[in-house]
Image (spheres, helix red, strand yellow):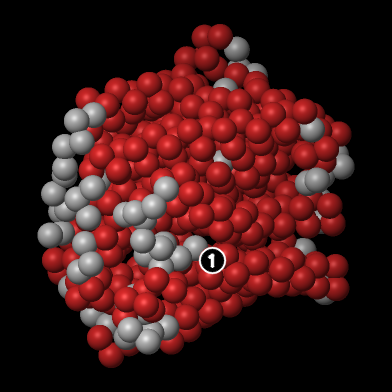
Amino acid sequence: MTEQKTRRSTARDMTRGPIAAQVLLFALPLMLGNIFQMLYNTVDSIVVGNFVGTQALAAVGSTTMIINMLVFFFNGFSIGAGVVIGRYFGARDMNHLHKAVETTMAATFVLCLLFTAVGLAGVKPMLRFMSTPEDVFGEATVYLRIYFAGLSGLLVYNMGSGILRAVGDTARPLFFLVLTSVLNIVLDLVFVLGFGMGIEGVALATILAQFVSAALTLVLLTRTQDIYRLSWGDLHIDGAILKGIFAVGLPAGIQSVITAFSNVFVQSYVNAFGSSCMAGWSCYNKLDQFIMLPMQSMAMASTTFVSQNMGAKQLKRANRGTVTTVALSVGITAAIAAALYLFAAPAVALFTNDPAVVKFGVLFLRANVFFLLFNCVNHVLAGALRGRGDSRGPMIIMIACFVAVRQLYLFVVTRFVANTPLLVGLGYPVGWVSCCIVELIYFFVRWGKHRPEPPPEL
């Protein structure tokens, strides 16, 4: 089989064909995959909320922001690698594409060791910093320690699937996630109901499933005969390519970490209202993450679409793809938001039957859900900008709005207006709306005339 024929069989060339169809065919498997990946932690919450207790549910929820800080930083590296690989793919530069794959995976293995050590060392200090109540602190510590001990499985899978996404393959990562998500559900029930392991059981089930997904991804990358094949004998770090990856990925990672760190402050405001409010906020955050899946998938589609077309020097097509992707993201998110607004109580009740927790979860969900339409614009435009090699712009805008504006709002409203759960919960939409306004202005001023941005790594 020729290289070109093989390439078409597993990768998607987004430099030609109908734009909306290309974006949807890329994003839909990715969206489904993200749903199943979200099931890892969500199933943990459902199991502990229904079979362990409210304190255990609050413990799992309170750890989400800490986990996200490390995972989001690594995902910035994944975004940078995807842009570089996608750019080489669009330019048909197969020699540099191969080097980029080897560099990406070699650096990933180094970062796995670093992130595991940082995560384990930071468990108690971070929980103390978030003012985690004593009735939640012990279980949260146990959950985080087990999770970080197995963090490498998640990181290796995310990077491997990022390589596949960069060349347009979202179908096989979806298959792996479906398989391992089902495994996670089974192990959750076995460890908690069968062995009575409590919160330790759901954490162990999660990391075991993540290691299986990582192993499957590595086997695929190693055995494929396509252009993105991982050759263990060639595994090394190319300095110039790694610099290009970090030029895009480091700002994206810093932005994500600082935003997640800012959300730790939001969590600390929520913690002041007690474990029922914490658990309700946890339920809302789980549902909020599901609503955000379409826009996150569309943002990844935007990054891949733009990076490939920038590599092919099709600048007008890259901008048309950005507008199309924003429209698709807003339409899909609006439909989901309407459904969740109407059925907020049953949705929150999936996690718990505690009336106080359900009340808080519904309050947060209905107050914030439609503001996510502004966040569609934020995510897709940020993805498009990174696909152009412009990662610093969205980093600065998102840090300013998601951190500075949000924290200023929370400080002012809780001290000079009223310190209520509703006003604290509205801290998220304040950041989303301000970011949407600034990012739209930035995008049209900087990119309205289709001006090319030289790839930082070429």
**Between 206 and 318, the one nearer to me in the picture:** 318
Q: Residue at x 43, y 87 (%)?
A: 223
**Between 131 and 220, the one nearer to me in the picture:** 220
| Residue 320 percent coordinates (x, y) | 34, 38
Count of marks overlaid on the render: 1
Q: Residue at x 45, y 52 (%)?
A: 22
Quick one: quadrant of the N terminus?
Answer: bottom left
| Residue 6 percent coordinates (x, y) | 38, 79
| Residue 419 percent coordinates (x, y) | 61, 17
The reply, left or right, for residue 110 in relation to residue 410 is left
- Judge whether 447 appears above or below 184 on screen: above
- Judge whether 279 appears above or below 70 on screen: above
Q: Residue furthest front?
A: 17
Q: Residue furthest top?
A: 417
| Residue 181 percent coordinates (x, y) | 67, 66
Quick one: quadrant of the C terminus?
Answer: bottom left
- Judge whether 73 appears above or below 349 on screen: below
Residue underneath mark 1: 171
Mark 1 surroundings: few (<14), some (14-19) or many (≥20) residues within 10 A: many
The reply, left or right, for residue 92 in relation to residue 252 is left
Q: SS class of the residue under badge 1?
A: helix
Q: Which amino acid, mark 1?
A: Ala
